[in-house]
Each structure stands twice: as structure tokens, then as C-alpha cells.
Image (cartoon, rainbow, N blue to C red):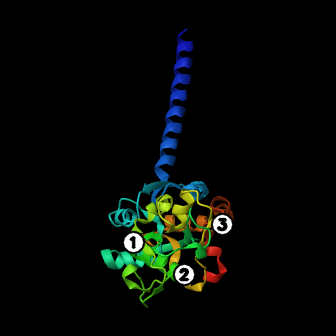
Amino acid sequence: MKNTFKKFGAILIAALSIFILVGCGSQASADKTKTVKIGITGSDDRILKAVGRKVAKDGIKIKVVQFSDYNQPNTALDQGEIDLNSFQTYIFQDDWNKTHHTNIVSIGETIIAPMRLYSKKISNLSELKKGDKIVVPNDATNEGRALTLLQSAGLITLKDVKLPTVKDIKDNKLKLKISEIEATQTARTLGDETAAVVNSGVASDAKLDANKAVYSEQITAKSKPYVNIISVNKKDQNNPTYKKIIEAYHSDDIAKLVDKYYKGHEKAAWNYKVLQ
């Protein structure tokens, strides 16, 4: 009987030892996982989730942090609340750094997303009437870009400035009433106003059809400042973990997912030859 108890005790101790070792191994594996917080605006995180699945094998976990407007992600990045953000263009980042005295840099391009003029009341520019209302984003870079789009459409003429505002309109033959609103809210005005210039991400979230836009921004070599990027505090620009995320992002399968998910709203910038 004693031998039986001894054998049972030995088996129990061995089992517990294995359990403890397995638990320790799992904890060690978890401790090696590097969590990277990436800030975005809007609700669409499908591409980053796909990138996250690719880098998981390298022990990297991507945690997406969502913000409601364009003013928050750079502040959060500068204050160390997130590690990276993925929402802005080169020109937006440059303007932000100058205005807020930050040192945020790009570590990789993501997508090129043409701005478009949308409407639920007209389908062609020729249908615009005198005094019609058009909404544009109110932040400096997106407003300038939206007004430049309206100029290329032949609706207004602007003074020769880098980031035009409504005050820089020098010719407006139709006396269009151009109002400014937070970029993420532009699509919501379409039920009331004649038309709105909407960023691609906002348009995609609002289920707007890019093929039915009244007018689309033309992508040329001059569009480089409007390429979307993944940004980081300059001191972290050589972080090897972040570089692995960019490498995973710049892959053929992610480019295919961009085409699949956004149906023309956005294109993979690293594959866009006209921008190279």
C-alpha cells in the first residue's frame, strides 16, 4: 500500500511539474510578444488587422486605437499614448509639426486616396446653380486640397498659395457658398447641402460610391504630398519592430486587400508608379 501511495505521489508531482513548466513556457511566450498601439481615425481597421496577422509570427501584436477626429492621433503619438498612427498625409504631418512644434516623421507609405466631390442632388458639374452650397473639410491641409480640387473642376480660381483657404478664392463665378466643417463630418451634410468634398476614408465609411462621384481628384506626380503614411516620433524611426510592420504592409497580398476592400476609393501607394 505504501509503495502505491509513493508511486501515486511521484506521478502527481511529475504532473504538477509539467503543468508548471507549460504555464511558465506560455507566460514566457506571452512576455516576448511586443504590443504596438497604432492610432487611426474612423472605424475601418481591416487592413491593419490583416497586417497584424502577418506580423504575429514575429511576436508582434498590433492594437488599433480609434480616434474620432484628425486632431487626436498626433497628440496621442507625441504624448506616448500610442506608438504609431496611420491616418495622415505627408502634407498634413508637415503642417502639424510646424503648428504644434512636434517631431513626427513617416516610416512608410500606405495608400493614395483621391478626394472626391459627392452629391445626392446633382450628378454632373453642369447642374450646379448660382448660390449652391458646397462643404469642404476645415483643417488646413484638407481644406487646401479640397479647394484645389474645386479649382481643377473649373468652379473657382485660387490665389497662388501653398495651403489655400476660402479667403484665397479670387474668382467664384457661380457665387458658390463654400462652408467648412470637420473632415469626418463632411459626408453627413449630403442630405442638406448641394455637394461636399469628402476624404476617401470618410466616403468609404459612409458607403459612398466612388464611381458615382461628381468629380474626382486626378492622381499625378504632384499628388505625392497627399500620400497617406504611417507615422512615428522621430526618436523611434529606426525601431526594428516598426520596420517589420512596414515590411508586412508593403506586400502584394495587402495591396490586393486594399483593392478588394475599398473598391477604387484607395490604392496601394507603394505600388503606384506615377508617385515613384
Give the image quarter of residue 126: bottom right
- Left or right: 207 with respect to 178? right
- Secondary element at image label 3: helix
Residue at x-position 47% and y-position 74%: 106
Q: Position of residue 16 (x, y in %)?
A: 51, 28
Determine the CA span between mark 3 and mark 2: 23 Å
From this viewpoint, which residue is outermost toward the front?
130
- Report crowding for label 2: few under 14, some 14 to 19, many 20 or more residues within 10 A (C-alpha): some
Residue that badge 3 annotates: 211
Amino acid under label 1? Asp
Give the quarter of the figure containing the C terminus.
Answer: bottom right
- Secondary element at image label 2: helix
Query: Looking at the image, which is closer to me, 56 or 171?
Result: 171
Determine the CA span between mark 3 and mark 1: 26 Å
**Above or below — where is 19 with respect to 110?**
above
Amino acid under label 2? Lys
Badge 3 or badge 1: first in the primary sequence? 1
- Left or right: 65 with respect to 210? left
Q: Position of residue 215 (x, y in %)?
A: 59, 74
Residue that badge 1 annotates: 139
Asked if one can make out residue 195 in the rendered structure from this viewpoint, the answer is yes
Residue 235 is tagged as none
